[in-house]
Image: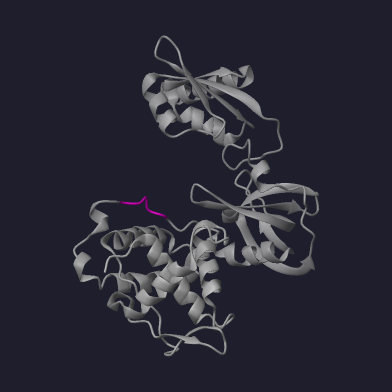
């Protein structure tokens, strides 16, 4: 029996409805509405009819590929049930299904050792074990056709579970924070708003209670963390999307966005076009083969390091103060090799 994707979805929905304990003995109209809602986002009857549900139920009861579902209609209850309470349809996986599942598992495995995803480990292992039993595809080795960048376990990830609880429950935390600049520990009382990952490092965004100021702190520099009994009311004016709208990297965002104009040679321009520096990026090629890139961002250390990494291939045109700053850094770098 060949299943189209819409029929397969309807079969699964009907199966779930019949097995549901919250709504026993679903009627034919209930099944129709559930299928139409899932597939089309409406339940008016314009897309799925009662006769379609009749055909689906017949197929589920009579097709071997669907396991001869023991569907029974209870006249007194006005709905359907399984005569075998343990029954559930088992639709076969297609070649494409297995490939997609394996690709998804490969992606999940990439993050499996991260503390925040540790609860997924058993589930991933179970699915991997079951999918490997598909003899038809046992020879497939995704490692030979797709490779992911290795994900190292960064320092500070051990704090993620308690920080997630504090964000969800709006509970203040206390911890020591040691910045890289001077290596001197500070004690913080913090109202956490958001956890953010950037370049395989995790950061905590929240309000410093003592300074009444929103800060972004790296988890790799946090120690002696403690979840307190004090709750707080989240600041409704804090918008995570807006907060990072003009950010470049994960630096300080207490600044005014500026238009940064960069001039890149033809080779570097192709890389920047393929991997944009920022969502606000605009590009325009000149007659000499160079490309000007315009970004609207709040200047940060990450931006400076990114520009410096391009060496002679990228020139800062504006603003003037940033151009001078990059020139000064390049001069000092050159001095390291000419002294």
Relative side of 29 to 149, left or right:
right
Q: Give, as a single range, the part of the protein colored magenta.
A: 147-151
Question: Can you tell which quarter of the image residue 170 is in?
Answer: bottom right
Q: In this view, does 98 lie above or below 320?
A: below
Which residue lies at the image location 72% right of the left edge and 63% below the top edge? 173
Which quadrant of the view contains residue 107?
Answer: bottom left
Residue 177: percent from left, percent from top:
66, 55
Exactly how many numbered labels are in the figure?
0
Q: Position of residue 210 (x, y in %)?
A: 81, 53
x and y, in percent, of residue 279 in the image: 55, 34
Q: Which residue is painted at 79% across and 62% down in the image?
A: 232
User: Which residue is more in the foreground, 50 or 162?
Assistant: 50
Is residue 14 shown left or right of residue 89? Answer: right
Magenta segment, prevailing SS (helix, strand or loop): loop
Q: In this view, does 335 lie above or below 117?
A: above
From the viewer's perspective, tell me whether residue 225 is left or right of residue 118: right
């Amino acid at each position: 029996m060949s299943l189209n994707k819409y029929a397969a979805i309807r079969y699964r929905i009907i199966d779930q409805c019949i097995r549901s304990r919250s709504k026993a003995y679903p009627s034919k109209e209930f099944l129709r509405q559930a299928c139409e809602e899932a597939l089309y986002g409406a339940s008016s009857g314009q897309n799925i009819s009662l006769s379609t549900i009749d055909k689906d139920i017949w197929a589920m009861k009579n097709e071997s590929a669907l396991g001869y579902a023991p569907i029974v209609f209870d006249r007194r209850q006005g709905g359907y049930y399984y005569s075998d309470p343990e029954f559930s349809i088992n639709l076969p996986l297609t070649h494409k299904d297995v490939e997609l599942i394996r690709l998804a598992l490969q992606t999940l495995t990439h993050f499996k050792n991260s503390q925040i995803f540790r609860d997924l480990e058993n589930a991933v292992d179970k699915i991997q074990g079951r999918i490997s039993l598909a003899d038809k595809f046992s020879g497939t080795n995704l490692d030979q056709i797709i490779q992911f960048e290795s994900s190292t376990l960064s320092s500070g990830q051990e704090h993620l579970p308690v920080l997630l609880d504090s964000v969800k429950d709006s509970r203040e935390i206390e911890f020591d924070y040691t910045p890289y600049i001077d290596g001197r520990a500070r004690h913080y009382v913090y109202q956490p708003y958001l956890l953010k990952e950037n370049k395989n490092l995790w950061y905590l965004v929240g309000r410093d209670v003592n300074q009444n100021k929103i800060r972004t702190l790296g988890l790799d520099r946090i120690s002696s963390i403690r979840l307190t009994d004090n709750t707080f009311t989240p600041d409704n004016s804090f918008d995570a999307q807006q907060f990072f709208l003009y950010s470049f990297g994960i630096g300080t965002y207490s600044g005014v966005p500026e238009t940064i104009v960069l001039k890149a040679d033809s080779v570097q321009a192709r890389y920047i076009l393929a991997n944009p520096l920022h969502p606000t990026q605009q590009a325009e090629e000149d007659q000499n083969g160079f490309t000007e890139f315009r970004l609207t961002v709040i200047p940060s250390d990450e931006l400076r390091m990114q520009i410096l990494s391009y060496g002679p291939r990228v020139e800062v045109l504006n603003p003037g103060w940033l151009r001078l700053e990059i020139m000064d850094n390049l001069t000092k770098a050159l001095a390291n090799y000419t002294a």
